[in-house]
Amino acid sequence: MTTPSAAFRASAHLLTRLSHKFRLIEQAVPLPHSGVTYEIFQPATFDRLLTAAAQDPEQQLPYWATIWPSGIALGDAVLQQHRQFAGQRVLELGSGLGVTAAAALAAGAQLYVTDYSPETLLLCQLNTLRNVGLQPQTLRINWRQPSQALLALATPRFPIILAADVLYEKRDVQPLLALVDQLLAPDGVLWLAEPGRPPALHFVETAVSSGWRDSPTQHAGPWPDPQDEDVIVNVHRLRR
Ligand SMILES: C[S@@+](CC[C@H](N)C(=O)[O-])C[C@H]1O[C@@H](n2cnc3c(N)ncnc32)[C@H](O)[C@@H]1O
């Protein structure tokens, strides 16, 4: 149990640590359906992140540094069905800045978040501590090469996996299908939020054609960035 003063100390420590890496700005992120607003820290500029990405062996661009409609929609869906999360072991793949993670912790989940970027795991902890006074356990992963540590975390397998806007590259469809199959309990549910990118549609079609059942809902915003005005996010609940 994190006390308010321990949460404050931990977030102050993370803020100092992250401020040495990059200048941070804080943005208000309303979750349109539940009426909650989170204050989310993110890097102020992308220049240094793009320079670092150029050296990355996997050529990973710093998409983690942006607030995406899918993460907001998934957070909203979690809060709307919070009873399903209370007390559950939940894994999030590609957590980014932590909007969905804050909602899952607020709903009472025992949350493990994973991402390729170590910086975003720290930001996720900072943002959840600041907004809900709780932090998830974190693990750096590359879902294309699942580590023993990730497989060990999934013993027992997770009843719920969350993933928001993680399917934007064709090369990730098969690794993520295989990984979810490995990490999710037989009667578990994958909550996948996606804004209609072709790899995500391919993922859902492949899962459904191999026997998974889907019950999607649509989320239309409004989103913080006016450029996302027309984005519709599908939140799929996929079970075998
Ligand atoms: C578009 S962002 C979405 C972030 C967050 N879920 C949201 O909706 O705001 C995709 C996330 O997936 C992570 N990611 C991309 N490729 C990955 C990989 N191979 N292994 C683990 N995480 C990865 C990125 O670092 C980033 O945080």
Image (tube, rainbow, N blue to C red):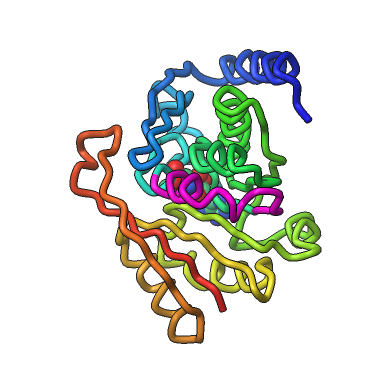
Query: Residue 71 or 177: which is nearer the viewer?
Result: 71
In this rendering, the count of numbered labels is 0
The answer to whether 80 is drawn above or below residue 119 in the figure is below
- Image spot of residue 192 (x, y percent): 47, 60
- The quadrant in which the N terminus is found is top right
The answer to whether 144 is drawn above or below residue 137 in the figure is below
Q: What residue do we see at 45% from left, 34% from top?
A: 65
- Image spot of residue 47 (x, y percent): 39, 27
Residue 166 part of the magenta segment? no
Report the magenta stretch's main SS: helix
Image side of residue 58 versus residue 140, left or right: left
- Image spot of residue 4 (x, y percent): 70, 18
Image side of residue 53 versus residue 184, left or right: left
Which residue is situated farthest in the bottom direction here?
210
Query: Residue 38 or 44: which is nearer the viewer?
Result: 38
Residue 89 visible? The answer is yes
Q: Quadrant of residue 45?
A: top left
- The quadrant in which the C terminus is found is bottom right
Q: What residue do we see at 70% from left, 46% from top?
A: 110
Q: What residue do we see at 43% from left, 32% from top?
A: 36
The answer to whether 59 is drawn above or below residue 205 in the figure is above
Q: Quadrant of residue 6?
A: top right
Query: Residue 50 or 143: which is nearer the viewer?
Result: 143
The answer to whether 133 is drawn above or below residue 158 in the figure is above
Image side of residue 205 versus residue 109, left or right: left
Residue 42 visible? The answer is no
**Residue numbers of the magenta segment:** 73-90
Which residue is situated farthest in the front direction here?
83
Q: What residue do we see at 35% from left, 44% from top?
A: 69
